[in-house]
């Protein structure tokens, strides 16, 4: 029986690779077609293999030869990663012993040559690469950073072994026997930003050693350096962390005590952190970086709210990155592990796959339309009414402001003043009453007197956007819930999980459960509607299936 170990799109979604317990293959996505398979024996044999083959007894019968050839073409693979559409390929063979998958091989598939091999002290749980960096993530929590141009080790980040812990605590699930998951992500852009949960960082993590030295790549920084360096990196995006904003010096422990939802952006080119921000109150369950580094999408272990943080490109050349906007997206009210987040090529759409039976698609380049309670998708069993518990709703926030102002009515202001918008990460476009409250003179006078008035501007005003399109794969089996706890049924193994890619208006889906590769068509964009009226987008149209193919 063939088991799917990994499905991976290359960075531009032009190809997809499958790694199984018997072989690995690479397919072109559009038009679909296989162009490489390990079962064809395309990679050149080593000298030892060639000698062994040449010394085989010539009198061996055909059945024995066929059996030997079958064994030679079997190639169990844990991971296969491509560098865009180049011939550079990273392969991790699936180990047949208890030591785990510790060997990594780099190939040039076009020339059918193995470039080199790397061996590691622990099981490899994932690989990320772009044109400048190769990152190898180990089960013990180490992150090996290589200069890909010469395959030279330049840094080892010794982080907490958070990968298994986060998976096991999310939704009371246990993943015994399953592969550990990578929560962070590496951008495909040459800026090469690595984004990780801050909970992975400890006082021994070598964050601030800038030296590109392979002689001592794991030299640690002491806790004093880390503590003194955090203040300048923090970007406040959550209203409930004003106590940190007022604090003189913020340490790593301060952030961890506040929440497990903090995120760190690490520059793997300059080997230093560039940004720390709070994404959620709950622990981080999934992180995805857009190819151009301009957006970071995060989901907590609850899986109800997704946040997209837009990074100001003008800050790429500065010491600290700046967040220019935060967009809130509502997946649903049911707890679910989000295992896939994926941006399309121009970052206008975010795809979200979870263990539920629905895959959601959100628009990111349009202002949020006002949503009215009670609207639900006929094709979607999830109820979108409940708010995510790790963020207060804008309605509650507006009510609090209204109570604050009820005893002191605001003096009249001219129409032009009402239409001015305060500087903020969040859109005020569809909350007319909120805009009036913020921009009237009395409210402004209050804000000026607040000890954390700068932080006040970062409150979350925009209600979460809802998906405009969805896909329900018939192969999916919803997880079971017993006694208020969340368990994955054995019948759903392999788990409900897909990889999401995009090709213009086509959605590309690869299923771990069946090994089927799908082409779906996105619904056509609809015209904008006025604020406050039901829009076509709120109907969340279902994408329609164009074709499906087998990867196994």
Image (cartoon, rainbow, N blue to C red):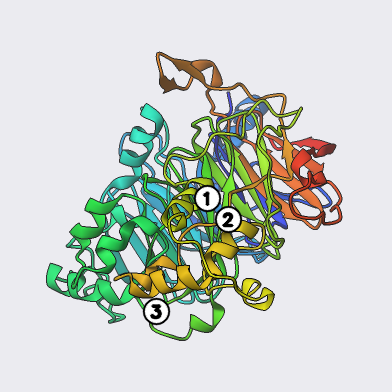
Q: Residue at x 55, y 79 (%)?
A: 313
In depth, the one of 427 and 126 nearer the eye is 427
Distance between the alpha carbons at the discs numbered 3 and 1:
29 Å
Mark 1 or mark 2, which has the lower sequence index?
A: 1
Asked if labels 2 and 1 touch by Cβ distance under 8 angstroms, the answer is yes
Residue lying at the far bottom in this picture: please name it: 317
Residue 130 visible somewhere in the drawing? no
Nearer to us: label 3 or label 1:
1
Give the residue pinned by disc 1.
Answer: 394
Q: Are marks 3 and 2 in contact (CB under 8 Å)?
A: no
Residue linked to disc 3: 320
Q: Is residue 347 left or right of residue 269?
A: right
User: What secondary structure is marked by label 1?
Assistant: helix
Left or right for 152, reference 360: left
Say if residue 545 shows up in the picture. yes
Relative height, residue 522 to residue 196 (above, below): above
Q: CA distance from mark 1 to mark 2?
A: 7 Å
Looking at the picture, how far across and down is residue 368, in whole percent? 68, 55
Which is more foreground, mark 3 or mark 2?
A: 2
Whichever of labels 3 and 1 marks the residue nearer the N terminus, that label is 3
Residue 40, image x, y percentages: 68, 44
Q: Which sits in the foreground, 26 or 158?
A: 158
Q: Secondary structure at mark 2?
A: loop
Answer whether labels 3 and 1 touch (C-beta < 8 Å): no
Q: Is residue 34 depicted above or below 365 in this figure?
A: above
- Which residue ends up furthest to the top in the rendered image? 483
- The residue at which mark 2 appears reads as 462
Please give the label number shown on residue 196.
none
Quarter of the image for the C terminus: give it.
top right
Badge count:
3
- Whole-number angstrom distance, CA of label 3 to CA of label 2: 26 Å
């Amino acid at each position: 029986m063939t088991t799917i170990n990994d499905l991976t799109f290359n960075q531009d979604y032009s190809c997809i690779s499958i790694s199984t317990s018997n072989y690995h293959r690479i397919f072109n996505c559009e038009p679909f077609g296989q162009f490489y398979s390990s079962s064809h024996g395309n990679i050149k044999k080593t000298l030892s293999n060639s000698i062994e083959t040449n010394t085989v007894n010539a009198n061996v019968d055909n059945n024995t030869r066929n059996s030997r050839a079958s064994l030679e073409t079997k190639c169990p693979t844990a991971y296969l990663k491509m560098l865009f559409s180049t011939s550079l390929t990273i392969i991790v063979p699936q180990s047949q012993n208890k030591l785990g998958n510790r060997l990594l091989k780099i190939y040039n598939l076009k020339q059918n040559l193995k470039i080199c091999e790397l061996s590691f002290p622990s099981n490899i749980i994932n690989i990320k690469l772009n044109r400048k960096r190769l990152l190898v993530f180990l089960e013990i929590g180490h992150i090996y950073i290589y200069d890909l141009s010469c395959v030279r080790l330049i840094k080892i980040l010794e982080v907490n072994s958070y990968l298994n812990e986060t998976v096991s605590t999310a939704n009371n699930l246990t993943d015994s026997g399953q592969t550990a998951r990578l929560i962070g992500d590496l951008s495909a852009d040459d800026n090469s930003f690595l984004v990780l949960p801050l909970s992975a960082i400890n006082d021994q993590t070598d964050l601030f050693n800038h030296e590109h030295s392979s002689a001592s790549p794991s030299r640690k920084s002491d806790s004093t350096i880390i503590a003194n360096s955090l203040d300048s990196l923090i970007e406040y995006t959550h209203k409930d962390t004003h106590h940190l904003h007022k604090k003189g010096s913020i340490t790593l422990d301060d952030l961890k005590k506040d929440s497990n939802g903090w995120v760190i952006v690490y520059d793997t080119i300059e080997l230093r952190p560039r940004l720390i921000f709070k994404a959620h109150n709950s622990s981080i369950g999934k992180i995805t970086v857009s190819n151009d580094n301009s957006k970071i999408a995060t989901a907590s272990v609850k899986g109800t709210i997704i946040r997209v943080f837009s990074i100001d490109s003008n800050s790429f050349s500065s010491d600290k990155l700046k967040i220019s906007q935060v967009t809130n997206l509502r997946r649903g009210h049911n707890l679910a592990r989000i295992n896939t987040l994926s941006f399309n090529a121009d970052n206008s759409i975010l795809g979200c796959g979870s263990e539920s039976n629905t895959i959601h698609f959100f628009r990111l380049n349009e202002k949020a339309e006002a949503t009215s309670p009670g609207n639900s998708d006929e094709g979607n069993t999830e109820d979108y009414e409940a708010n995510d518990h790790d963020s207060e709703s804008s309605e509650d926030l507006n009510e609090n402001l209204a109570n604050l102002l009820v005893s002191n009515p605001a003096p009249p202001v001219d129409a032009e003043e009402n239409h001015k918008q305060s500087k903020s990460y969040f859109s005020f476009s569809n909350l007319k009453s909120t805009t009036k409250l913020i921009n009237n003179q009395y409210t402004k006078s209050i804000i000026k007197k607040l000890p954390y008035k700068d932080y006040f501007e970062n409150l979350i005003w925009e209600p979460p956007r809802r998906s405009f399109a969805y896909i329900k794969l018939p192969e999916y089996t919803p997880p079971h819930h017993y006694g208020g706890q969340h368990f994955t049924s054995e019948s759903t193994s392999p788990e409900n999980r897909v990889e999401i890619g995009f090709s213009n208006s086509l959605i590309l889906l690869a299923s771990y459960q069946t090994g089927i590769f799908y082409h779906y068509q996105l619904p056509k964009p609809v015209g904008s509607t006025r604020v406050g009226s039901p829009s076509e987008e709120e109907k969340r149209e279902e994408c329609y299936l164009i074709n499906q193919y087998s990867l196994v």
